[in-house]
């Protein structure tokens, strides 16, 4: 989703006249549940300011006060989203999620240099390989998106945070591949094994197994956050515990959970210059 776009889940289309899912929809619209809980796994959340959750009717009008969840609240609750569905749900048709992104500082769209990011790692010979020129590299998966239109694309430091310059003619390589399970692009960088001694710049050294490395690279200023809805549960109101067969509701709630997991995957990607 690009910034300003919204993700809508059409709960009626998915559950109406769909066997026991229809009964769950009826229970929600009869205000027999108190809260909807959605567990999410959000990556690259540092560009998010908040999420806005809207409950809409068939004409896309709000049927309740929008729920604004700050990034701090998301972190505090381990990315669990809670939505009040205790009343006024008779016309519920859509659950809408809208990301609100940061706009200031390094997240300003005029920042073309990117956002600095640091990762700590150790040289591991098990991931080392030789390129066609016989130079040794170690392949390393990055946590963030790599900004590739800058030179150099990365910087190395030792555990004392001294800059490690690469020998002349040696540079980083990188790859990107799409994860077939998450459909998310994953970035990898090939780190050269050789570097110049920061205390004796004419002397060339080589990483050994277990050496600590600090890697710095830039992230593009694109408002991107990836979130997978992992689990969705509802809290049944106390009155319904006595009146509405809660055990059966719980069984079919499992199917509801699986259905939402299958149907909802938030991909929030906003492109900038």
Image (spheres, rainbow, N blue to C red):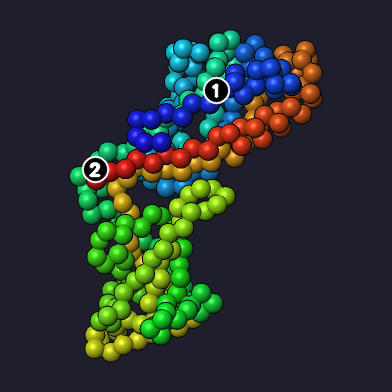
Q: Residue at x 41, y 36 (%)?
A: 1
105 left or right of 237 in image: left
Q: What is the quadrant of residue 206 in the picture?
A: bottom left
Q: Residue at x 28, y 43 (%)?
A: 272
Dot 1: few (<14), some (14–19), or many (≥20) neighbours within 10 Å?
some
Secondary element at tag 1: strand
Secondary element at tag 2: loop
What residue does disc 1 label?
A: 10
Q: What is the quadrant of residue 256 in the picture?
A: top right
User: CA–CA distance between discs 2 and 1?
Assistant: 33 Å
Task: Note whether 226 is above or below 264 in the view shown.
Answer: below
Q: Nearer the viewer, mark 2 or mark 1?
A: 1
Q: Residue at x 29, y 48 (%)?
A: 221
Q: Which of the two discs, 2 and 1, labels the residue nearer the N terminus?
A: 1
Does residue 52 appear anywhere in the picture?
yes
Q: Residue at x 41, y 71 (%)?
A: 190
Please name whichever residue, 16 or 72, is drawn nearer the observer in this view of the structure: 16
Q: Name the spot of residue 57 as percent of width and height, x first.
A: 50, 13
Q: Name the spot of residue 186 as percent of width and height, x first.
A: 46, 56
Q: Name the spot of residue 4 as percent of width and height, x first.
A: 35, 30
Dot 2: few (<14), some (14–19), or many (≥20) neighbours within 10 Å?
some
Q: What is the quadrant of residue 232 in the picture?
A: top right
Task: Note whether 89 is above or below 168 in the view shown.
Answer: above
Please name whichever residue, 218 or 60, is drawn nearer the observer in this view of the structure: 60
What residue does disc 2 label?
A: 109
Q: Residue furthest front?
A: 132
Q: Name the spot of residue 191 as percent of width and height, x first.
A: 39, 73
**Quadrant of the image for the C terminus?**
top left
């Amino acid at each position: 989703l690009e910034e300003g776009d919204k993700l809508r889940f059409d709960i009626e289309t998915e559950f109406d006249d769909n066997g026991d899912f229809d009964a769950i929809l009826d229970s929600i619209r009869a205000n027999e549940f108190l809260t909807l809980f959605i567990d999410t796994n959000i990556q690259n959340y540092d560009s998010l300011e908040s999420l806005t959750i809207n409950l809409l009717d068939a004409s896309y009008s709000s049927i309740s006060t929008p729920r604004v969840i700050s990034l701090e609240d998301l972190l505090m609750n381990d990315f669990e989203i809670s939505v009040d569905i205790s009343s006024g749900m008779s016309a519920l048709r859509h659950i809408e999620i809208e990301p609100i992104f940061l706009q200031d500082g390094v997240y300003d769209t005029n920042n073309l240099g990117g956002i600095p990011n640091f990762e700590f790692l150790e040289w591991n010979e098990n991931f080392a390989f030789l390129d066609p020129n016989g130079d040794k590299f170690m392949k390393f998966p990055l946590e963030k998106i790599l900004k590739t239109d800058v030179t150099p694309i990365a910087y190395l430091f030792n555990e004392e945070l001294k800059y490690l310059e690469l020998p002349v003619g040696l540079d980083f390589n990188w790859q990107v591949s799409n994860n077939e399970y998450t459909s998310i692009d994953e970035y990898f960088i090939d780190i050269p094994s050789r570097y110049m001694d920061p205390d004796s710049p004419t002397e060339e050294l080589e990483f050994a197994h277990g050496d600590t490395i600090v890697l710095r690279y830039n992230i593009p200023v694109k408002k991107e956050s990836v979130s997978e809805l992992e689990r969705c549960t509802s809290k049944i109101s106390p009155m319904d515990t006595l009146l509405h067969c809660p055990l059966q509701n719980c069984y079919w709630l499992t199917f509801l959970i699986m259905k939402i997991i299958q149907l909802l995957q938030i991909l929030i990607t906003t492109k900038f210059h």
